[in-house]
Image (tube, rainbow, N blue to C red):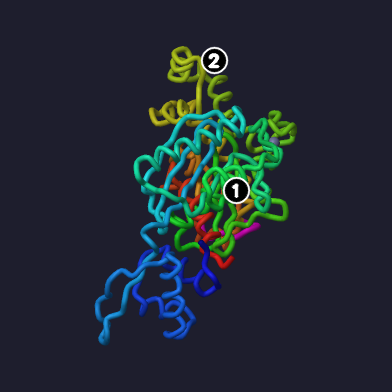
Amino acid sequence: MRPENAHQAVLLRLLREGGRSRAELGDMVDLSRSKLNVELDRLIELGLVEPDGLAESRGGRRSGKVRLSRQTRFAGIDIGATSVDVAVTDGELNVLGHLSEPCDIREGPAVVLDRAVTLLGKLREQGLYSQLHGVGIGLPGPVSFPEGVPVVPPIMPGWDRYPVREAVSEELGCPALVDNDVNIMALGELHAGLARQVGDFLLVKIGTGVGCGIVVDGKIYRGVSGSAGDIGHIRVDDDGPICACGNSGCLEAYFGGAALAREATAVARSGRSPYLAERLAAAGELTAQDVAVAAAQGDAAAIQIIRDGGRRVGQVLASLVSFFNPGLVIIAGGVARLGHVLLAEIRSVVYRRSLPLATGNLPIVLSELGDIAGIVGATRLISDHVYSAG
Ligand SMILES: [Zn+2]
C-alpha cells in the first residue's frame, strides 16, 4: 500500500517522526487546511494513517491528532560477513524485536537468505507482525541499487548478481530494497543516531572491510554505478601489503579486520606484547577485539597498532573532508570499538591536514547506535520507498 500522490507521501514521512495534530501538520506543509484534511482522510481510508484522539487546544477548537497506522510493520535485514541481524519495526521505525545470529556469508545466498527469513519467522511467531509492508536489506559488498543485486562482491562467493531483492520480496510478500551495509548504516544514523539534524555527512565503517556512506542533503549518494564511498581501496602506500582486491597498499589492506588480526599476530609472535602472545596461545588466533582489550589494558604494542591504523584512516579522511566539506563524520563498525585511541588519532590527522574552513565546525565522533544502525537504516530505506508516491 503506497500513497497516491506527493502530498500524501510528505505527510507520511512527517508522521514517521511521530504522531501530530492536523493543526501542527498544517504548519509544516504547503497545503490549504481543506486540502490537508482531504489528504489525511484519504490516508486514513487507505489504512496508512489512523486518528489518535484530540490535541491540546491552541486557543480555538481542539485539533484532531493523527498517527501512522499501528498495523504498519517494516523489516530490516543486515547481513554481515560473519553475522545476520533481523528486526521488525512499526511505521515510526521503533524496533519491536531484533534477533542476531552468527552466519558465514560464504555459505552463499540461498543458505544465508533462508536464515534471515527463518529469523523473521520467529519474530512473526512472537506476534510482532502478520504482514510486512516492506523489507530493507543490507549486504557487505557492492550492490547495484536499481537492480537489487550484489555485483562482484569480493568476500561473498556465489552472490554475484544473485537476485536478492526479488527473492526476499517474493518470500516475504512485500516490497524489498537492497543496498550495501555502509549505506544502510548511514541511513540508520540519519534516522536515529547522531546525524539526525545533519543533512551532509560521512559515515566511515571500519569492520571486516572499510567503506564510507555519503549523505548529501539527507539522501544517500551512490554514484553512477553504486560504488561511491568504496574508500577501502584508496591507495595509502605504493609499497604496502597486497589487498584482497589484487592491488597493493589499499587502506583496507592496512586496517580492515583481517589486517588487524594479522598485525596483532605478528606483534604477539615478536614478543612485543605479552598480553597478545598469551591470547594467541590460548585461542589459536587473534581478532580486532583482542587488540581492543589489549589497548584498554595499556598494552603499548596494541595501542601502536591502533594509532598506525587511525593515522592511515585519517590521511584518507582528510582528503575526503577537503573534497566534500561534511557537517559531521561518524566512525562506525566493529573496529570502531577500538574506541577513543582510534578516534583521537583520526581526529588529530584530519584536523591537522584539512583546511580550517572545512574542519572549523566538524565533529568527528564514534557511532552511538552500534549494532542496530544497519537494521534501523534498512527499515528507513524501505520506508522511504513505501512512503513515496508510486
Ligand atoms: Zn584493495
| In magenta stretch: residue 326 | yes
Residue 233: percent from left, percent from top: 68, 40
User: Can residue 132 be spotted in the picture?
Assistant: yes
Measured Cα–Cα span from mark 1 to mark 2: 40 Å
- Is residue 125 shown left or right of residue 160? left
Identified by mark 1, the residue type is: Asp
| Quarter location, residue 354 | bottom right
Q: Which mark is residue 269?
A: 2
Label 1 environment density (alpha carbons within 10 Å; few <14, some 14–19, many ≥20): many
Residue in the image at 53% along x and 34% along y:
114
Q: Nearer the viewer, residue 13 or 389?
A: 389
Eyeballing the image, is 248 above or below 171? above
Task: Identify residue type, mark 2.
Answer: Arg
Q: Residues within 10 Å of mark 2 (few under 14, many from 20)?
A: some
Q: Is residue 351 visible?
A: no
Do labels 1 and 2 touch, CB within 8 Å? Answer: no
For the C terminus, which image quadrant?
Answer: bottom right
Q: Is mark 2 within 8 Å of ligand 1?
A: no
**Mark 1 element type:** strand
Report if the beta carbon of the residue with label 1 is closer than 8 angstroms to ligand 1: no
Q: Nearer the viewer, residue 84 or 255?
A: 84
Q: Position of residue 15 (x, y in %)?
A: 41, 67
Ligand 1 location (quadrant): top right
Compared to residue 21, the image places residue 355 above or below, namely above
Q: Which residue is mark 1?
A: 179
Region in magenta? 322-329
Q: Residue at x 57, y 40 (%)?
A: 311
- Secondary element under disc 2, as helix, strand or loop, is helix
Note whether 250 is above or below 373 in the view shown: above
Q: Earlier in the sequence, mark 1 or mark 2?
A: 1
